[in-house]
Amino acid sequence: MFFILSKLLYYFLSPLMWILILAIFSWKSNNLKRKKVLTWITIASIYLFTQTIILSEIYRLWDTSPRPISEVKKYEIGIVLSGMAHYNHYTNSLQINRSADRIWQALNLYHTKKIQKILISGDSGSISEDGLHEAQQMKNNLVKWGIPSNDILIETKSRNTVENARETKKLLQKIKCFPTDKNKALLITSGLHMKRAKAVFDKAQIPVDCFSTDSALSEERNYSLSDFLLPNFELFHPWTNILKEWIGYISYSVMGYI
């Protein structure tokens, strides 16, 4: 039930939906004072959610900073969390999204011998069957690209971060390759997702260090005048992502998952 509710909630997190609802209430309101207040709230919301500098600074507060591969020590296992792809029914193949930087960086870590094995955790995060079986399908592709099958471990049952940790723990115990405080695994996921993922793995008592991917952060704040003045309507999606992480973190805290 928690899984279904969490997936349904995602569709109500878009600021664009909030703005449309505010605009409709403002338009339908017969009370002039209420209409004026709702109109100004709608305008303020459009400004807030379309300003690059505002979103960038909020990302800086939440996103886990990346680090160069050269600074990473050696690990036996790199744990890559799913959420990197969709299934394309026209081509019968994986179609990657921005989060696929997780597997890209895992491959970089593998080829530079920073990790010995890649463990991909996760099946499909969809409520209904959508053809996606991410861990298995991603492994199939990696093997085609020349990665030895023995160096790719997969966990194919989990559908969210809590299940990622739970099922990964079972797998590591089964293959007798469980990390220790002195010999941790390397957790590989998006910088925006890392705080919640690390907290979940800590709660599951799986010793891990972090390697963040697809981060939007930069060392310096190189803002231009347009970032202060011009609205960017492409920001609704990243706003939805960060709101999803905030709500997810709070929900996991309430449920005792972290």
Image (spheres, rainbow, N blue to C red):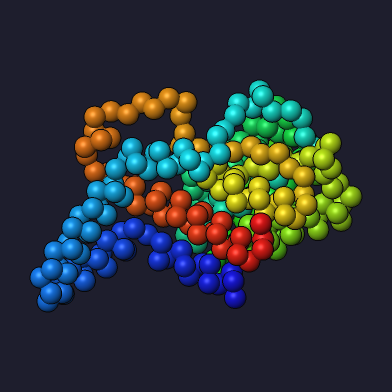
Left or right: where does residue 85 sit relative to residue 58? right
Front-lying residue, 93 or 155: 155
- In this view, the residue farthest toward the right is 176
**Residue 93 in view (yes/no):** no
What residue is shown at x 60% (from left), y 51% (from top)? 196
Residue 166: image quadrant is: bottom right
Residue 134 makes an appearance in the image: yes
Q: In this view of the protein, which residue sits in the foreground, 24 or 167?
A: 24
Question: At which x and y percent is residue 26?
Answer: 18, 68
- Tally the marks: 0
Identify the image quadrant of the C terminus.
bottom right
Which quadrant of the structure image shows residue 145? top right
x, y percent for residue 45: 27, 54
Name the residue located 59 percent from the left edge and 45 percent from the top edge: 194
Q: Residue at x 16, y 74 (%)?
A: 28
Question: Does residue 73 appear to the left or right of 134 in the view shown?
Answer: right
Residue 164: percent from left, percent from top: 68, 57
User: Where is 196 relative to 25, above or below?
Assistant: above
Q: Is 255 on the left or on the right of 218, as rendered? A: right
Estimate the x, y position of residue 59 in percent, counting from the top left: 45, 41
Quadrant holding the N terminus: bottom right
Quadrant location of residue 52?
A: top left
User: Which residue corresponds to the image point at 87% horizontal and 56% vertical from the top-left?
Assistant: 174
Residue located farthest toward the front when viewing the structure as drawn? 33
User: Residue 213 versus residue 199: which sits nearer the camera?
Assistant: 199
Q: Nearer the viewer, residue 235 or 61?
A: 61
